[in-house]
Each structure stands twice: as structure tokens, then as C-alpha cells.
Image: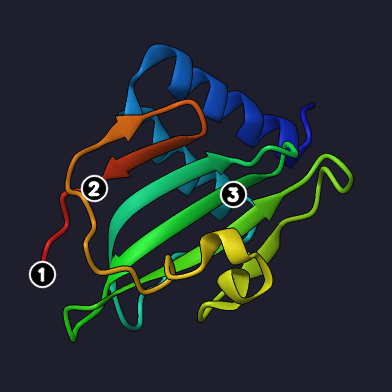
Amino acid sequence: MDSKYETIKKLHHKVNCGGNAELLKDALSLLENWGINRRTDDGVLYQINISKSENGIFVVGLRYIKSDKTFTEDIFVFTSQKPNDVSKYYKGKYERINKEYKGTHKKQNISSLSFTSVNTCSLHTGNNQ
């Protein structure tokens, strides 16, 4: 049985190689199976992202549009050093720790296009308020 890290790594690879961002929806059921529930109190899921950093860390981001029409993102981090752990970051904590993510937590100019690139795969879920 694959670790959580290996599972996310394989999903990223499958989406990236196939260019099919729709496969990112699998991340939602994986997170749920691992005890991570989606935001329900303030926000509708707007975008799913998986990024791979240069040091092999995988970051799953669930971006929501809140009732006040602003965006926010919940971050889940997977590392090879702790392959069955999921580090959870809410309320901009990840961008305060990792400067490369500065400004992304509440980023407001979000593309409604789904895409895959070398490091990031993104799926617009089509939920608009």
C-alpha cells in the first residue's frame, strides 16, 4: 500500500503526464479518506491545485470563494521524510512560513481555466457564487 506522499505524487504525475486536470477531483476523496474534510462553513470550493516544489514536497491547495466574494485557500503538505503525515495550513499560515507562497492565500485574480504545467496542476471546479 502506498504512503500518502506516494499517492499524491502519483496523482500529480498522472495529471501532469496526461494533461487531464479533471483527475484532480481524486484529491478530494483522498483527503476525505485521510480524515480531512472540506470547508463547509464559509466558502464554496472553486479550485483544486497540486504543486511540486523543487525539494520534492507536494502541496495540495483547496481554494474557496467565500460568501463575501473573496478567495481563501486551505493547504495540505506531503513530504517524503514523513510519508504518511499530512501537514495542514489554514488562514494564510503556509505563506507566512514559506515566502515563495506570499500573497497566494487571499489571491483574488484567480484563473477560471484548468491547466497543468511542470510543477502545478490546477482544476477550476466551476463553482461560482
Q: Label 3: which residue?
A: 59
Decide which of tag 2 and tag 3 comes sooner along the chain: 3
**Side (left or right) of 57 relative to 14:** right
Q: Which mark is residue 125?
A: 2
Kindly tell me whether residue 36 is visible in this rendering.
no
Q: For the point 46% across and 13% down, which residue is it?
A: 17
The disc labelled 3 sits on which kind of residue?
A: Val
The disc labelled 2 sits on which kind of residue?
A: Thr
The disc labelled 1 sits on which kind of residue?
A: Gln
Decide which of tag 3 and tag 1 comes sooner along the chain: 3
Tell me where residue 24 appears, x and y as whole percent. Answer: 41, 36
> Which residue reaches farthest right?
81
Which residue is nearer to you in this view: 63 or 105? Answer: 105
- SS category of the residue bearing label 1: loop
Neighbor class of circle 1 (other Cα within 10 Å; few <14, some 14-19, many 20+) is few
Which residue is nearer to you in this view: 66 or 56? Answer: 56
Mark pair 3, 1: CA separation: 26 Å
- SS category of the residue bearing label 3: strand
Image quarter hosting the N terminus: top right
In the rendered image of this protein, does residue 107 appear above or below residue 91? above
Q: Which mark is residue 129?
A: 1
Neighbor class of circle 2 (other Cα within 10 Å; few <14, some 14-19, many 20+) is some
Q: For the point 46% across and 37% down, which residue is it?
A: 120
Kindly tell me whether residue 126 is visible in this rendering.
yes
